[in-house]
Amino acid sequence: MRRRWAGTAVVAALVVGPATSAQAAPPGPGNLSPGAPGIGDRYHPLDGNGGYDVERYDLDLRYDPGSDELSGTATITARATQDLTSFDLDLKGMRVSALTVDGAPARHWRFGGELVVLPAAPIAVGAVFTTAVTYSGVPRTVQDQLGTSGFVHTDDGALVAGQPEGAATWFPVNDHPRDAAAYEVSVAVPEGLEAVSNGSSAGRSSAGGWTTWNWSAPDPMASYLLTLAVGEFDVTTREVDGRTYLDAIDPDADRLQLGEDPAAPTAGAVARASLARQPEIVDFLSSQFGEYPFTDVGGIVDDDPSLGFALETQTRPVYSPAFFTDAVSGDSVVVHELAHQWFGDDVRLASWQHIWLNEGFATYAEWLWAEHEGHATLQQIADAYAGIPAEDPFWSLRIGDPGPDHLFDAPVYVRGALTLHALRRQVGESAFWGIVRRWAAERSGEAVTTPEFTALAEEVSGQDLEGFFRAWLDTPARPGAPSQGA
């Protein structure tokens, strides 16, 4: 999740169609036509693109924190899903100095956040083609109604948190979770700094005052889940039960005192303790959801508390130090982001409308963990939220279709978890866990929707759940309470 905001969980209180645009290339003869400038998400009409499916990104980059300049080449291997005269990539800002398709120079132009590519020859449906884009510039940080995202410039480098559409601020991309791909990332930074990304380390080398860090993430990954952290980090690695745990913690977090008690542990100390529990947490979540879907695990903690969010960047979530005020808060946010590795990363969204599927499961995982730790029972937590008065705005959002400006509102998280808990009570233990584990296993590596989840729930339970899900997801009122203008 992008917005697992600090200070909002009741657990702590209990414990303590595709758009078109004028930039499109002209239609070609016969079946040849331009790829659409959007993938078809009505919340973000120009995110992603039509006409091709990306198989792999190879990013060969250099980043200088002194100037904030990022430069390099992105090589994109894709398969055409139609006969193409042209296609788009998403890229916001940055300067493109060269572009080739299958080694031949290609015409290209910019239209807003679209990079339109006209290859020297049309591309046939089913053909695999390679686009290389050489570019440079200062990646911009996105500040909008949803908060901060994209390429965030820190005191000694940068931290990338791309949800929902920040990937395009630092590399050319088909920027939508529907098109997941493998990633190989190579980043040169000034010697003495670390550069950490997703997946497994593929080694590093130094020359001429620069160190190149290489990372390999072969499992399909949505573009917003790709991260990059550059700066001074203490990087630790360990092997547990066949998984590699790699953590990167800013040493300045060890001097960051949150709160007024000078005797309290620092954010860095709390973060280290919570991340040390990752193998235990992964084992617990595996017992609930099924086998952990990847071989790499870990976390990145920067020292800037103004970041204010955590994000489930695949295999290596990023965390604001603001979550690490105490052990309960620290452990809970790690549980949340690791639960996303199943729900949000491996099983990802087909459209942003369905975000409750990500956040509801991750929040419910926090509640499961709280009960496991003896802090509070699931029912105590659910009852605390259910006690919010019916007239409270908490109940007025349709979490099954919250709208693009409310993707990360608290009701999406909490009422998503409440929906799952209510489903559990509705269908019973055996059916509920059958639904959850089949959802994780059968939809592994796929992009999913709410109707697909509700259909599985009805199949497994043998119940007609249309009214149930309508009340919990699509009605702007507390379930069982009079509608507030539904």
Image: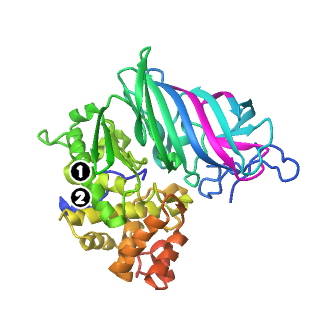
Q: Position of residue 445 (x, y in %)?
A: 50, 57
Query: Circle 1 is placed at which residue position?
Result: 277
Q: Taking 29 as reference, is 61 left or right?
A: left
The magenta region covers: 70-98
**Sooner in the amino-acid sequence: mark 2 or mark 1:** 2
Q: Taking 262 as reference, is 406 left or right?
A: right
Does dot 2 land on a helix, a strand or a loop?
A: helix
List the single residue furthest toward the bottom. 463
Q: Determine the residue positioned at 49% across, 68% down.
A: 398
Residue 339, compared with residue 61, is above or below; it is: below
Q: Determine the residue positioned at 21% across, 38% down.
A: 257
Is residue 182 one of those drawn in magenta?
no
List the single residue furthest toward the left. 263
Query: Circle 2 is placed at which residue position?
Result: 12
Q: Position of residue 119 (x, y in %)?
A: 76, 37
Name which quarter of the figure residue 394 lies in: bottom left
Check disc 1 and give the amino acid type. Arg
